[in-house]
Image (cartoon, rainbow, N blue to C red):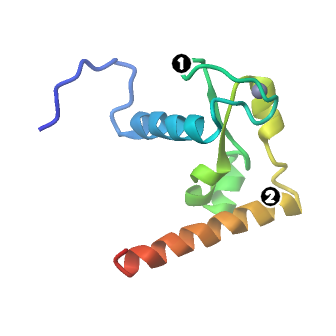
């Protein structure tokens, strides 16, 4: 059984906040505590922002699907709003289309591995 924890009343209960914290931690480790846009390093408790490369605009989610838009490969940990904006890929470009396609291939590969029981 899970330990009873004091819940922040503003905390989401759908597991999304846990997913986000976990992704933040994974990204922090992967990026060695460095903002990939400006190169500054900070402690883990710094107010990092998880930025979407292809932005989570309604049409982007409708076009590429939430699995692509919210995929870890479309997320990057940045240290400011300025870096957040710089991390974004213009969704109307070929670069965005290629990036989304690469994520789709990765998702496809993972599904295949799951089907094969790996
Ligand atoms: Zn930065």
Q: Position of residue 50 (x, y in %)?
A: 62, 35
The residue where tag 1 is placed is 45
Work out whether mark 2 precedes mark 1 in sequence or the reverse, and give the earlier one: 1
Would you call the spot at circle 1 few (<14 residues within 10 Å), some (14-19), or many (20 or more)? few
**Residue 100 horizontal side relative to residue 19, left or right:** right
Label 2: state its secondary structure: helix
Q: Quadrant of residue 103?
A: bottom right
Q: Single out the residue that lies furthest toward the front.
A: 32
Quadrant for ligand 1 reads: top right
Q: In which quadrant will I find the C terminus?
A: bottom left
Q: Which residue is mark 2?
A: 96
SS state under label 1: loop
The answer to whether the residue labelled 2 contacts the one labelled 1, judged by CB atoms less than 8 Å apart, is no
Residue name at image x 80 percent, y 34 percent: 37
Looking at the image, is mark 2 or mark 1 nearer the viewer?
1
Residue 12, relative to residue 56: is it above or below? Answer: above
Q: Position of residue 40 (x, y in %)?
A: 76, 24
Q: Residue at x 47, y 78 (%)?
A: 112
Above or below residue 44? Residue 55 is: below
Which residue is painted at 79% across and 65% down in the image?
Answer: 98
């Amino acid at each position: 059984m899970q330990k009873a924890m004091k819940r922040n009343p503003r905390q989401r209960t759908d597991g999304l906040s846990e997913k986000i914290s976990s992704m933040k931690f994974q990204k922090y480790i992967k990026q060695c505590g460095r903002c990939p846009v400006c190169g500054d390093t900070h402690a883990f408790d710094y107010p990092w922002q998880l930025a979407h490369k292809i932005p989570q605009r309604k049409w982007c989610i409708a076009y590429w699907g939430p699995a692509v838009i919210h995929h870890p490969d479309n997320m990057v940990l940045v240290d400011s709003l300025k870096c957040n904006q710089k991390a974004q890929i213009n969704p109307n470009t070929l670069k965005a289309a290629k990036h989304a396609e690469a994520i789709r291939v990765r998702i496809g590969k993972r599904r295949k591995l799951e089907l094969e029981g790996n």
